[in-house]
Image: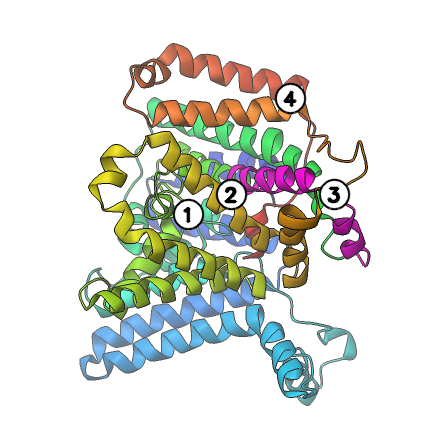
Amino acid sequence: MLFHTWVFLAFCLVVFPVYLLVRKNNQLMNIWFLIASYTFYGWWNPWYLLLLFGTSAIDYWMVLLMERKQSTRKLWLIISLVSNFGFLGYFKYSGFITENINALLSMNLPDPSVYPNYMLSFFGAPDDWLFASVILPIGISFHTFQSMSYTIDAYFGSIQTERSFIRFLTFVSFFPQLVAGPIERAGNLLPQLQGTPTITGRQVADGLSLFLVGFFKKVALADYLAKYVDQIYGDPNSQHLTALLEAQSAPALIVATVAFGWQIYFDFSGYTDMARGIAEMMGFRLMLNFNNPYTATGLGDFWARWHISLSTWFKDYVYFPLGGNRGALWETYRNMFVTMVISGVWHGADWGFIIWGGLHAVGRCATRDLELTFFYKERLPRFVKQLAVFTFVTFTWIFFRAPRWDNASLIVERIFVTGWDMPTGKLDPNFPLLLAVLVLAVWIYQLAYTSQSPLKQMLESSVVKVGLAVCMIVYLLIIAQASSKQFIYFQF
């Protein structure tokens, strides 16, 4: 069920009125949210609900056991972590691991789907119940990390144990942010689910505004950009992908790479804007997940602005436990590098994601001390730093978007070596002018908004905000085309 479809509108027309009727009874409110959230998630595939419920139930009971049996707290934490990483590892990474073991060791390990099939066959399940392959449940990394953070925080005593099983299931499955974040912490969302949300006219207006901005980002910008990006980068499943990439000119590949950088930003931040808007209209406040990342003046600044809920998750549960910056300098760099590579692995089971994470790890380590110098902070022009960060980040998107490592290396080769030697007339990237104007306008707006100039005050005025909202609505009604394209981060 996608936010920008008529099905979701019908879903909301049922969920919202009932919620308003039951919200003052906390137990009924959480039961209703749980029903709505499981309906929302099960809309894609009802079998996904078994995994969602199973991982949530394990974490709930492990925390209760931690509280009841202090001497074995670490054991219950380990069981929780092993089960979470076990499910995540099987559904997301088992195929990738099997494929690489077979290639590296010349082995012939079977597809990982055979293991549950053995069990199903043992219990007499019919053949049509057997799995043809391992299916990746939508948003598994998001709800797994959200549930797991509760267990870790409870172990270290930073949150109170949640005793209501229904409320905890609702916390893990809260439908606005279930499949693509923000990855909420128990310390923020659970207290809101424990009380009676207050809904004001200002919250409804802010929620509608956020939803409109996110809807515009997705339908008018991200999906429009996707048409061009897909035309140049090709279908990942196409047998003729290599031939297609070899036929592309360097300018076309550069423009498509820049376009993808904006596509993934509009797509992902658009989802979280809509998620936060929906929650805001119901009286819930979700954390900010994007803060104008393409205005960042350093790679550290970029990761403080991009997918903030994931960046802070890795900082709190990976970087700091490794030692953070408390040890020797080389240990700080090691911790940064490992954290960034793991971030790449989180995004997907493919060498392209690992290389993407590795490039950011190298870039972050190489620029950390530079970004702390007086010259960098005070002497280097702000726009030069922003352009340098944008260029580096955009280059790394090649490895994120290309379906395989060999495709990514071919794109890099075409851009930097052979793609400029094309017949006359082949250098035109043929990028839609209207879309170029829209993206440039968004970037200029963000640069101005994050600056200290008087222009920022003008952009924050009610007149400008209302005017922009009207323009977005008019564009969506007159120019934008209907879209049912899935969000990019659903695959993670």
Mark closest to the chain's N terminus, 1 or 4: 1
Determine whether 128 is above or below 258 in the image: below
Name the dominant secondary structure of the magenta segment.
Answer: helix
- The picture places residue 477, in percent across and down from the top left corner, at 64, 19
Report which residue position mark 4 lands on.
Answer: 434
As measured in the structure, the alpha-carbon distance from the residue carrying label 1 to the one carrying label 2 is 9 Å
Q: Is residue 318 found left or right of 353 in the rendered image?
A: left
Report which residue position mark 2 lands on.
Answer: 268
As measured in the structure, the alpha-carbon distance from the residue carrying label 3 to the one carrying label 1 is 38 Å
Q: Amino acid at mark 3?
A: Asp
Q: Residue at x 57, y 35 (%)?
A: 218
Report which residue position mark 3 lands on.
Answer: 421
Q: Residue at x 69, y 38 (%)?
A: 252
Q: Residue at x 21, y 60 (%)?
A: 160
Mark closest to the chain's N terminus, 4 or 3: 3
Mark closest to the chain's N terminus, 3 or 2: 2
Q: Amino acid at mark 2?
A: Phe
Q: Does 487 appear in magenta?
A: no
Q: Which residues are magenta?
A: 238-266
Viewer-proximal residue among 30 and 119: 119
Q: Does 243 appear in magenta?
A: yes
Q: Amino acid at mark 1?
A: His
As measured in the structure, the alpha-carbon distance from the residue carrying label 4 to the one carrying label 3 is 28 Å
As measured in the structure, the alpha-carbon distance from the residue carrying label 2 to the one carrying label 4 is 22 Å
Q: Are marks 1 and 2 in contact (CB under 8 Å)?
A: yes
